Amino acid sequence: MSGIVELVYFATAVTFILGLKRMSHPTTARSGIHWAGVAMVVATVATFFHPEIDGRYILMLLAIAIGGGVAWMGGRKVEMTDMPQMIAIYNGMGGGAAAAIAAVELIRVANDPALAQGHGPMALWLGVLGALIGSVAFSGSVVAWAKLDGRMKKAMYFPNQQWINLAVIVLAVILGIVIATTTPSGVTLLLFFVLALAFGAMMALPIGGADMPVIISLFNAFTGLAVAMEGFVLDNAAMIIAGTVVGAAGTLLTQLMAKAMNRKISNVLFKQFGGSQGKEQTEIEGSMKGVDPSDAGIQMAYADRVIIVPGYGMAVAQAQHKIWEMVELLTERGTDVKFAIHPVAGRMPGHMNVLLAEAGVPYDMILDLEEINNDFDTTDVTLVIGANDVVNPVAKSDPDSPLYGMPVLNADQSKNVLVIKRGQGAGFSGVENHLFYLDHTRMVYGDGQKVVGEMIASIKTL
């Protein structure tokens, strides 16, 4: 029976990988999720037949019922605009589960040192490392969720923060070595997990909104690695393969997100994004010029080519459905409309793509930075709704700017630019957007959904 279970684990792992591959394209992503989900269900059912389960079926069924029930209700109720925080907290649960598995095994080893011989020294080291990484992923993801959900309003800093963080992680590593090489006491185990959890939280506290896509994908990688390591401890092939794939995918995604912002991952974790850098930034010339939504709608209606650049402000205003309604009106008039998506727009990788897909926008209208950036100079009107730092031209021109070198969308090269924005504040980086002050830019102030609704009404009168 054990061999059959392992064979099923292998088959489900292959299915999981194939599902993950299908998630790489919008047209096959839904089926990829279904494939991966079915694989996880089959792997879970197979676990009931594992010889080492030893009749603990009631506890397993209870855990599945509670966890599955909470996830089902949460998934049905969550708004698409709240998807980043849901993903952050669910990712954290994965890391927490890996840490909990490690805690149980380490407590068993502490109570019965003979079990250490059964696991083997390598498995014990991996178990401790998985416990550390899983705990960091859990507490860090909880902080990320709190920030994304608005429960924690801004990045938090305190004196000597990085030195304190370093001291905490060094102490946690030392305790981890003690646990892996000796028979640990309950106090040692408790202190180890407290320090690991504290480091994860303090690691995420200073992360600003602009860096959220990077930190979320990094914690996702941590969760995958922790699960894989605990798979070695439990000798569970499904956990090893699934965790390794998730960890590898999360690591690659983290690198891509950091590259999209032209930032090193170490800078994301250990340096504040934006703010004063000890240099004077280029003085902004001109002023912001406002325009009424009705006039902006007319300008859009008479344009031959339009590019729409969405950002987090669109998600906050839940304006994606109104945007698509306006696009349908424009296309009926013969206007060529495309959407330009920056890799780090929103609060998680693919945030804008998810919102636009939910509103019914066809995939072929949604283009990324590399695909569309050369089209702005032939565009009549670029409409920016809720985006800020990702369209700031200072990133291309001012070496003293914190944004310098970050690839941005070339919205400034359009013949006309309309910006829907609540007020005149800077973006999450704290850097003023020079795009808003250009002669061919007009600001349309107000709530995104309301403003677009007035633009739609104006277009319908023509």
Image (cartoon, rainbow, N blue to C red):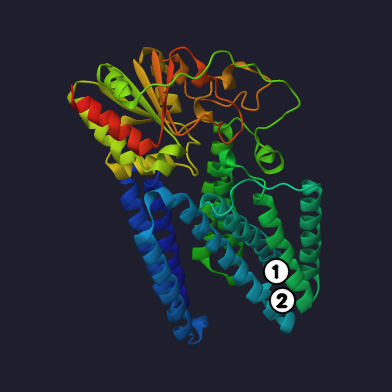
- Type of residue at label 1? Leu
Q: Which residue is mark 2?
A: 116
Q: Secondary structure at mark 1?
A: helix
Coordinates of residue 188 in the picture (x, y in percent): 78, 73
At 40% from the left and 42% from the top, the residue drawn is 317
Mark 1–mark 2 distance (CA, rounded to whole Å): 7 Å
Q: Is residue 45 left or right of residue 277?
A: left
Q: Spot the residue most to the bottom.
A: 55
Coordinates of residue 246 in the picture (x, y in percent): 51, 53
> In the rendered view of the protein, which quadrant contains the N terminus?
bottom left
Q: Residues within 10 Å of mark 2 (few under 14, many from 20)?
A: many
- Type of residue at label 2? Ala
At 49% from the left and 32% from the top, the residue drawn is 423
Q: Residues within 10 Å of mark 1 (few under 14, many from 20)?
A: many
Q: Is residue 327 left or right of residue 43?
A: left
Depth check, front residue: 456 or 185: 456
Depth check, front residue: 277 or 23: 277
Q: Which residue is mark 1?
A: 124
At 57% from the left and 18% from the top, the residue drawn is 396
Figure check: 422 above or below 147: above
Tell me, yes or no, whether the two marked residues, 1 and 2, touch with CB atoms within 8 Å: yes
Asked if residue 364 can be seen in this view, the reply is: no
Coordinates of residue 73 in the picture (x, y in percent): 37, 66
Q: Is residue 419 left or right of residue 121?
A: left
Which numbered disc flags the more N-terminal residue, 1 or 2? Answer: 2
At 65% from the left and 32% from the top, the residue drawn is 274
Q: Is residue 308 left or right of residue 396?
A: left
Depth check, front residue: 364 or 404: 404
- Numbered mark located on residue 97 in the image: none
